[in-house]
Amino acid sequence: MNDIVKHLKAFYKHKALYVKTGTYYSKRKNKPQYFYIFITGFMACGKTTLASILKNYLPGYYLDTDLIIQAREHMTITSIFNTKGEQYFRAKEIETIETLLTQPELYLDSSNDSKPVWNSKKHMVNPQCTNLSMVCCKKSHYLHLPELIIVSLGGGAIAQNQVRKILAQHYSKLLVVWLNVPYNTIVNRLQRLHDRPLFNVMQNSIAFLKLYKKRKRLYKYCHDSTMYSSGIKHWIQQ
């Protein structure tokens, strides 16, 4: 948790959301209503697990792009790949991420219980933990900070040039966290799963290793901070 707080402090300061006393945030023009933590990493690296931990510590919303797409398409990711193809899925992924950044309210309305659920209900901070605004800056230094949205991305999202462009366009209001997990750990996890269409086809092959290395370069290029699987285990143990 301390690592995330440290990076959020840097996020406020670096992204011009941290405001000195007397320059109150509420008086700034065009201030964003929301800011985002995008969690990225290779398939089966633990993005959903990390996001579920963060939502227990940080007040805000939690969204998963894969769950959003599945709910809107009424199909699993594997079924989408098998029936409509990877290109169709990637197009929906781009559309979802862009909408999240431009019209997040479309995914944050949890008032209608009959709607498909993709875990968008707002999670309040654990009473035993410090409020996000307080851990990021001194009380006299903040006012009306934007709400937090934690987004778990699909493993191949960052690999798309269009997604990287969209994130770059909205860079001032987001933080990209890369969950870095060793290749062998990824393979061991995937061998116990049956819902990862790319691995189902490629298995533990040279082509799959090349895909891992290619995406790793992109994660490394795009991320603001890095987390490791050992860090998640430490939080769970606590």
Image (cartoon, helix red, strand yellow):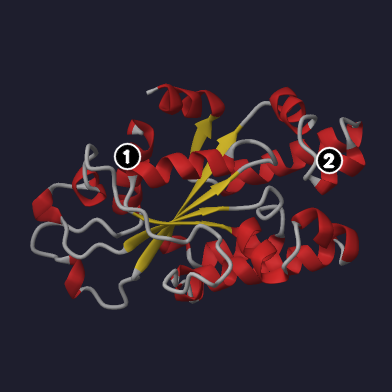
Q: Position of residue 100 (x, y in %)?
A: 52, 68
Q: Residue at x 66, y 70 (%)?
A: 72
Q: Quadrant of the C terminus?
A: top left
Q: Residue at x 60, y 41 (%)?
A: 220
For disc 1, the marked residue is: 5
Q: Residue at x 67, y 26 (%)?
A: 182
- 20 displayed left or right of 149: left
Q: Position of residue 38 (x, y in %)?
A: 51, 52
Q: Amino acid at mark 2?
A: Phe
Q: Amino acid at mark 1?
A: Val
Cα distance, mark 2 to mark 1? 34 Å
- 192 displayed left or right of 132: right
As rendered, which of 45 and 142 lies closer to the eye? 45
Residue 61: quadrant of the picture: bottom left
As rendered, which of 48 and 3 lies closer to the eye? 48
Q: Nearer the viewer, mark 2 or mark 1?
A: 2
- 87 displayed left or right of 42: right
Q: Quadrant of the N terminus?
A: top left
- Please rate how many residues cluster around mark 2, counting C-alpha atoms within 10 Å: few if below 14, some from 14 to 19, many from 20: some
Q: Secondary structure at mark 1?
A: helix
Q: Earlier in the sequence, mark 2 or mark 1?
A: 1
Q: Position of residue 93 (x, y in %)?
A: 68, 64
Q: State whether residue 202 is above or below residue 24.
A: above
- Please rate how many residues cluster around mark 1, counting C-alpha atoms within 10 Å: few if below 14, some from 14 to 19, many from 20: some
Q: Position of residue 196 (x, y in %)?
A: 78, 44
For disc 2, the marked residue is: 199
Residue 145: quadrant of the picture: bottom left
